[in-house]
Image: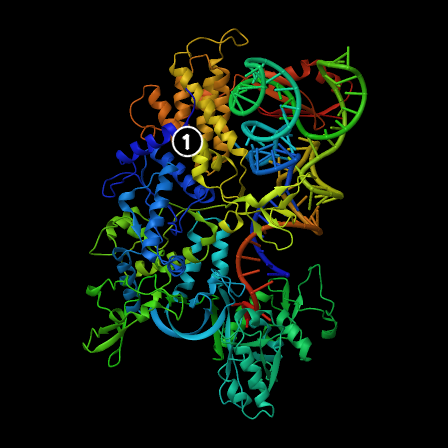
Amino acid sequence: MQYRPTDIEPKWQQRWADARVAETDVTAPGDKLYMLNMFPYPSGDLHVGHGRNYILGDALYRYFRMQGRAALNPMGWDAFGLPAENAAIKRGIHPREWTLGNIQRMKRQFARWGILYDWSKEIASCEPEYYRWNQWLFLQLYKRGLAYRGTAPVNWCPQDQTVLANEQVVEGRCERCGALVEQRELSQWFLRITDYADRLDAGLDTLEHWPEKVKLMQRNWIGRSLGADVEFPVPVLGHPIRVFTTRPDTIYGATFMVLAPEHRDVPALIADHPDREAIEAWITGIRNQSALERQEKEKEGRFTGRHAVNPFTNEEIPIWLGNFVLPQYGTGAIMSVPAHDQRDFEFAQQYGLPMRIVVAAAEGRTSRPPHEEADETSALQEAFTFKDESGISVNSGEISGLPVPKAIEKIIAIIEERGIGKGTVRYRLRDWLISRQRYWGTPIPMIYCERCGLEPVPEDQLPVTLPLDVPFTGREGNPLAKHDAFVNVSCPRCGGAAKRETDTMDTFVDSSWYFLRFITPRDDEKIFDASLVNRWLPVDQYIGGIEHAILHLLYARFITRTLHDLGLLQFEEPFTRLFNQGVITKEGYKDILTNAWVPLDEVVFDDQGTALHRETRAPLIPEVGKMSKSRFNVVPPDVLIERYGADTERVYTLFIAPPEKEAAWSDEGVIGAYRFLGRVWHMGQQICGGQAILPVPGQAGLPDLHRVTRKLHQTIDAVTTRIERFEFNTAISALMELSNVLGEHAGANIRDAFETLLKLLHPFAPHISEELWELLGNEGFVLTSKWPVADRELMKEDTVVIAVQVNGKLRGQVEVPAPAEEQRVMEAVFNSERIRSWVAEKEIVKKIYVPGKLVNVVVK
RNA sequence: GCCCUGGUGGCGGAAUUGGUAGACGCUGCGGACUUAAAAUCCGCUGCCCCGAAAGGGGCGUGCCGGUUCGAGUCCGGCCCGGGGCACCA
């Protein structure tokens, strides 16, 4: 019987569904294991690139099931967001309808891939049953002062008519639509994530099973830096200006001060300046710049005409304004040490400001700066940082002679003693702006009353339901604001007329706690059952794309901590193990002239095989990129499954490359996986048809079943350890090797070995595994059978081939019975004619024996 | 600029602690089966040289150098690709 995947796959998918194999009773005892794939945004159709993520998770899930673990593997939908609203505007479909339709399609696709989720726990963030807990969570944070309303310059996307988070601005453009982002001052809702900056940073050290890369990205994002706040007296102001520095040890070298143009003392400083108007105009110009513009501008400054006093040298130092000083970071003011900070150096060079060297290279440092000895600052070409033991303080009073770290310690002590500042820690992290002027999101449960002011919606009135009957024009901001019945409410405190908040929440709020809801998804009394959640969480294995390495994971870690502080959770880190899979790329065609991607059906080839654009006859270049509709390089799973089956897609997807790496899809490569499964299929048919009991003539006239057994146990061992290490590609290659060995013994009694192969194959190709398992007369699912255990004794080889080297060059090999004892190996080596000829008449200096591997004879 | 990665055949990729580089798969070539094609099966396939053949020799993991009996793996210095951050004081 021919291997026809389409004949068997739907049948098994149905059987797994009917038997509810993936449904987990979270109240039952057992060795719990919580697996989770990041819940997807239901954007519609899935391609094979998406498949990698889910196939990987499913393979792992099936493996753990067979290991006897009580594994939970739920799935849901990150269902709020902009694309649904855009679809409504463009095509007149209601966002809800569009979203639910996509969910149905994607669910069907998951089933076709043979992926098992516990659908009894399905959640969708756009349903009131889910988002009411978003609102509840918001109210708890509000009560604790962790949600607040603030005015801030925000990134405004003129195209989408909405506010974007810093992280949604990529190179000054909207992450979604690519429009140039503008700066606007708006009143917004924030979550005080900066209160947790230290804990979020410190917590990274406890995440042993997270990729180093992700931890590093988080660490950089939080941007913890240690330093000191120091006050510099400013006689003309009557109060000092506070600066933040990470290098208080260089304070003797602070020869000027630079303020952000937005600094609050600037108006007073320039009040009497003869060119006041020109400076004010310059400041206004900078204020109107977008973040991108400001970043790209050269360093530029203006002298205020005023001076501060360096509290250590007691010198008067000029106060400048500089576009490179950021108002949001530190105190918006810096002390400039041009000799030891590159930015200050450049600024000083540009405006001819003085510099003083206060750090010298330590003894024994190989590269010494040119100015040494002479204190010749003019010889400096760039700043010399020396931020560790390689630097020694000089010309710095009481800290002179100390290595930099010691000097920092001591100067902070002095600063604190003198009461002019203190050691501080600063973070790059900003508070999380969650307001969105958008319809398709969770309404923020707040009310504005003219008499009472800001009033939270009482908890017993939740959810604040998102009205469905709104117009979608794509203009003039949020459609919710035009829904009178939604907006006009009575104040929960005084009962008078009041207005509802029309901002909705950033969808990252939805995804910052969804993993908690999966345990008790239908609970309408509370956000989750704390005792069950504390048993099942943290998530044991979280799987998702690297694109969520910073924001989603950081927000989830933050919200988990706030719930911990509310006394609901006993843990602070939501995900114990994290795995980020790589993207799948595929070649597409790009027009040389316009640099635009060209659909495949518009590509023709000339005699030389050069790709041409059918329309214009312009040459095209093949280019590899992430699969996306705009690149016309997607591989739809339907076509693939129709032709080769889901098992083939699964095996190929996992075989193509190590899962964390980027992988290039190859249509030819798929055939290899298909052939492999075809061979397994035929072997199964033969064994089932009784062709398996006849001995085939081997070298000794009999099948080498010993070799089969050995290979089988080696494979059990290899597949098991490789799955545990996420080395799916080599796990599958081990199975191919086993199937090749079994193939050589096709006529022998390999039935037991073959059944074990089916088990090992199950995580990767579950349908064919179940089908052949049943064909061989077995009861029950392979999925619910027990994962085999390797017998180390049976894995051992009978003979050992020892490589023989002379002076490190391979000169031959000898075969000895296992175990390869040194004496026997050496005898064999020197009995070999061939090898003796290489060492003949030379003095043997040394013999090196590596057990079971090689012998190296060193001769003179 | 800073940080993190990676560089192995025509291609995707294998290679515990330094110990026979190229597993497994794709492609390509040759053969079997077939009226033919597809599918399937078998063999060969890193490069170069000697040989009719059996066989033998040399080179080879981005480049240069070092340590070692022995280096894809360790050390030093470069070159190139990918990703993240980017005036964060």
Residue A649: quarter of image:
top left
Provide residue A833's location: percent of width, then percent of height. 71, 13
Q: Say above or below: A16 vs A383.
A: above
Residue A751 visible from this viewpoint: yes
Residue type, mark 1 in image = Ala
Residue A355 visible from this viewpoint: no
Provide residue A813's location: percent of width, then percent of height. 65, 19
**Nearest the camera: A150 or A585?**
A585
Q: Say above or below: A477 vs B53.
A: below
In this picture, residue B19 sits left or right of residue B57: left
Residue farthest along the front direction in this orientation: A615
**Nearest the camera: A360 or B3?**
B3
Residue farthest along the top direction in this orientation: A701
Q: How is the image coloured?
A: rainbow
**Nearest the camera: A689 or A818?**
A689
Provide residue A269's location: percent of width, then percent of height. 54, 88
Q: Say above or below: B78 vs B42.
A: below
Q: Residues within 10 Å of mark 1 (few under 14, many from 20)?
A: many
Residue A562: quarter of image:
bottom left
In this picture, residue B2 sits left or right of residue A542: right
Query: Which SS class for mark 1?
Result: loop
Q: Say above or below: A606 vs A254.
A: above
Q: Which residue corresponds to mark 1?
A: A765
Query: Which quadrant holds the C terminus of chain A?
Result: top right
Q: How many marks overall?
A: 1
Query: Which quadrant holds the N terminus of chain A?
Result: top left
In this picture, residue A395 sits left or right of residue A524: right
**Nearest the camera: A793 or A221?**
A221
Provide residue A241's location: percent of width, then percent of height. 51, 82
Letter of the chain that mark 1 sits on in the rendering: A
